[in-house]
Amino acid sequence: MSSEYEFIVSKTWIEKTQKLQKLQNNNDSSKAEIDFVKMEIEALESMYDNYNNSQSYFRRAQGGRNGLREVHDKT
Protein backbone atom coordinates (compact mmCIF):
# COMPACT_ATOMS: atom_id res chain seq x y z
CA MET A 1 0.00 0.00 0.00
CA SER A 2 1.41 3.37 -0.90
CA SER A 3 0.31 6.77 0.21
CA GLU A 4 -0.48 9.80 -1.89
CA TYR A 5 2.85 11.27 -0.78
CA GLU A 6 4.76 8.23 -2.08
CA PHE A 7 2.82 8.38 -5.34
CA ILE A 8 3.55 12.07 -5.91
CA VAL A 9 7.25 11.74 -5.05
CA SER A 10 7.56 8.71 -7.36
CA LYS A 11 5.75 10.51 -10.18
CA THR A 12 7.97 13.58 -9.80
CA TRP A 13 11.08 11.35 -9.71
CA ILE A 14 10.05 9.77 -13.02
CA GLU A 15 9.47 13.20 -14.58
CA LYS A 16 12.86 14.49 -13.40
CA THR A 17 14.63 11.34 -14.59
CA GLN A 18 13.09 11.75 -18.04
CA LYS A 19 14.08 15.42 -18.05
CA LEU A 20 17.66 14.47 -17.15
CA GLN A 21 17.81 11.99 -20.02
CA LYS A 22 16.59 14.65 -22.45
CA LEU A 23 19.13 17.16 -21.15
CA GLN A 24 21.96 14.65 -21.43
CA ASN A 25 20.98 13.86 -25.02
CA ASN A 26 20.77 17.56 -25.94
CA ASN A 27 24.13 19.09 -26.81
CA ASP A 28 22.84 22.59 -25.98
CA SER A 29 22.17 21.76 -22.32
CA SER A 30 24.40 23.44 -19.78
CA LYS A 31 26.31 21.48 -17.16
CA ALA A 32 24.70 23.60 -14.45
CA GLU A 33 21.21 22.65 -15.62
CA ILE A 34 22.11 18.95 -15.70
CA ASP A 35 23.69 19.15 -12.25
CA PHE A 36 20.62 20.90 -10.86
CA VAL A 37 18.27 18.19 -12.13
CA LYS A 38 20.60 15.52 -10.68
CA MET A 39 20.40 17.32 -7.34
CA GLU A 40 16.60 17.37 -7.56
CA ILE A 41 16.55 13.62 -8.25
CA GLU A 42 18.81 12.94 -5.26
CA ALA A 43 16.53 15.03 -3.05
CA LEU A 44 13.45 13.12 -4.24
CA GLU A 45 15.18 9.80 -3.57
CA SER A 46 16.08 10.95 -0.06
CA MET A 47 12.52 12.14 0.57
CA TYR A 48 11.11 8.79 -0.56
CA ASP A 49 13.60 6.76 1.49
CA ASN A 50 13.16 8.87 4.62
CA TYR A 51 9.38 8.62 4.41
CA ASN A 52 9.48 4.86 3.90
CA ASN A 53 11.93 4.35 6.75
CA SER A 54 9.83 6.39 9.17
CA GLN A 55 6.54 4.84 8.06
CA SER A 56 7.81 1.27 8.24
CA TYR A 57 8.25 1.72 11.99
CA PHE A 58 4.63 2.80 12.41
CA ARG A 59 3.33 0.13 10.04
CA ARG A 60 5.18 -2.57 12.01
CA ALA A 61 4.06 -1.08 15.31
CA GLN A 62 0.44 -1.11 14.21
CA GLY A 63 0.59 -4.81 13.30
CA GLY A 64 2.43 -5.56 16.54
CA ARG A 65 -0.25 -3.89 18.60
CA ASN A 66 -2.94 -5.94 16.89
CA GLY A 67 -1.21 -9.14 17.97
CA LEU A 68 -0.99 -7.90 21.55
CA ARG A 69 -4.67 -7.02 21.58
CA GLU A 70 -5.57 -10.54 20.45
CA VAL A 71 -3.56 -12.07 23.30
CA HIS A 72 -5.07 -9.61 25.78
CA ASP A 73 -8.62 -10.33 24.57
CA LYS A 74 -8.16 -14.09 25.07
CA THR A 75 -7.20 -13.80 28.75
Image (cartoon, rainbow, N blue to C red):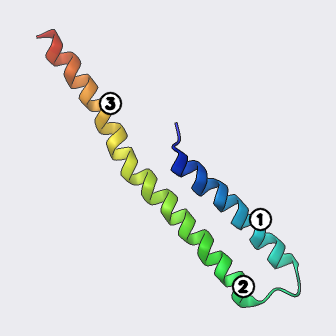
What separation in Å lies between label 1 and label 2 (alpha carbons)?
14 Å
**Which residue bears the numbered disc 1?**
18
Mark 3 or mark 1, earlier in chain: 1
The kind of residue tagged 1 is Gln
**Which residue bears the numbered disc 3?**
63
What separation in Å lies between label 3 and label 1 (alpha carbons)?
38 Å
What separation in Å lies between label 3 and label 2 (alpha carbons)?
45 Å
Mark 1 or mark 2, earlier in chain: 1
Asked which secondary structure carries label 3, the reply is helix
- State the image quarter where residue 35 is shown: bottom right
The kind of residue tagged 2 is Glu
- Residue, far top: 74
Q: Which residue is depicted at the point 54% across and 50% down?
A: 6
Residue 37: assigned label: none
- State the image quarter where residue 61 is shown: top left
Residue 33: assigned label: 2
| 51 shown above or below 16 | above
Asked which secondary structure carries label 1, the reply is helix
Q: Which residue is depicted at the point 16% across and 10% down?
A: 74
The kind of residue tagged 3 is Gly
Q: Nearer the viewer, residue 50 or 6?
A: 6
